[in-house]
Amino acid sequence: MPESVKIEDVLGATLLQSTIGIPNGDLIHTLYFYFSLTYLLLRAFSVLLFAASVYDESKVPKKFLQCVPSKSYCKEVEIFLLEVCFGEVSFTGMRLFTINRSLILTVVSIIVSYQVILIQMSESTNHDIISANFNISTHCRE
């Protein structure tokens, strides 16, 4: 029975491969890689934005309920207004976190920071390898 593939695993592997480089450097593989990376990022980002819009839209009735004339104001309007103001209508991750725009910004900033660290580490590793090769070749000449 095949295991299910998580989008985080595919996204993480694709982002890691984008920083390291593509093994096959021909044009078709390069175009396919960047097209699939863009598609995967857009799909994940759009799902998160749609989930965050539920939270944003749940706050819209507040301004209309506060403008209800006093003749029409009743107990039901008051209860609904309290629910809109203090209740939280949103998608959650097993009630551990709420998916809203600030969460999306936090996740994007973590991914960008991780990518910058990976790029810096790969550059320092390449620099160390080059300097090690240089040191070996200079010691061999002596």
Image (cartoon, rainbow, N blue to C red):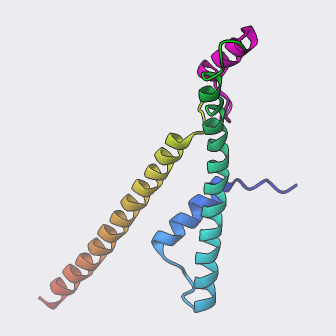
Quarter where residue 55 is shown: top right
Residue at the far front in the pictured view: 71
Which residue range is magenta in the image?
72-95
At x 64%, y 64%, the residue is 40
- Report the residue that reaches farthest toward the right: 1
The quarter of the displayed image where residue 117 is located: bottom left
Farthest residue to the left: give it. 142
The structure residue drawn at horizontal position 33% and vertical position 74%, both measured from the top left corner, is: 126
For the C terminus, the quadrant is bottom left
Position of 80 compared to 117: left or right? right
Q: Residue at x 67, y 29 (%)?
A: 89
How many discs mark residues in the rendered view?
Answer: 0
* Horizontal and vertical percent position of residue 3: 79, 54
Residue 136 or residue 112, whichever sits in front: 112
Is residue 52 toward the left or the right of residue 77 in the image?
left
* Residue 104 lies in the magenta stretch: no
Task: Tell me: residue 94, above or below residue 49.
Answer: above
Q: Quadrant of residue 90?
A: top right
Image quarter where the N terminus lies is: bottom right
Q: Residue at x 47, y 54 (%)?
A: 111
| Front-lying residue, 83 or 17 | 83
Across and down, in percent, residue 98 comes to: 60, 33
* Up/down of 29 relative to 86, above or below: below
Does residue 7 sit above or below 104 in this rendering? below
Q: Nearer the viewer, residue 100 or 76?
A: 76
Q: x, y percentage for residue 69?
A: 65, 18
